[in-house]
Image (tube, grey):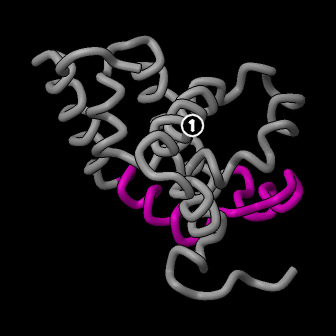
Amino acid sequence: MAKGKPTAAQAELLLRVYDLRREARLRAARDWFARSFAPKTMAEMQHLIPPGSDENAYLRMLVTYWETVCALLNHGLLHEDLFFETTGEQYMVWVRIEPIVGEMRKMFSRHAFSHLETAAKKYEKWWEKRERGYIQRMREMMATPQAMQGQPPPKR
């Protein structure tokens, strides 16, 4: 956990991270992901994001963006308290990819998304110290695009 107040450099980096999220293509990727991405298997994912599709590019862009940001956090370049107080989208990304991470790690690398996973675990601990039950409520809400839009999840 971060100790003390954030430095000016950490605050500046967090603002830069936020500013990058506003880039048009990344914004479109974030919107698509929040509305559409919740596969439970690699087969579902491959159907959802065929090679060469915009959706495939969106997923790669969004996940690598958050993996990079989480690497900055995990290496202490971002102040943990300040980051968690102002950012939660990385956790939604983790919740949505978590069901398929094991399969992805078998296909690509056992280290795939390790920064995102480490940051998610830190985020869960951080929130549970502040508000017991918050993480369970967020996981339920973030698990499906429909739940985030106030609709019941689709029947499988």
Q: Is residue 112 visible?
A: yes
> Measuring 61% from the left and 45% from the top, which residue is drawn there?
94
Residue 70, percent from left and from top? 47, 28
| Residue 153: quadrant of the picture | bottom right
- Does residue 132 lie above or below 114 as drawn? below
> Measuring 79% from the left and 21% from the top, which residue is drawn there?
109
> Measuring 15% from the left and 16% from the top, which residue is drawn there?
7
In this view, the residue in front, 138 or 145, is 138
Q: Is residue 119 left or right of residue 30?
A: right
Q: Quadrant of the N terminus?
A: top left
- Does residue 53 lie above or below 152 as drawn? above
The majority secondary structure of the magenta stretch comes to helix
In this view, the residue in front, 131 or 145, is 131
Q: Is residue 29 magenta?
A: yes
Q: How many labels were placed on the picture?
A: 1
Magenta span of residues: 25-51
| Residue 104: quadrant of the picture | top right
* Kind of residue at disc 1: Ala
Residue bearing the label numbered 1: 120
Q: Is residue 101 magenta?
A: no
Q: Is residue 17 left or right of residue 43?
A: left
Residue 60, percent from left and from top? 58, 42
Residue 54, percent from left and from top? 56, 58
Q: Is residue 58 visible?
A: no
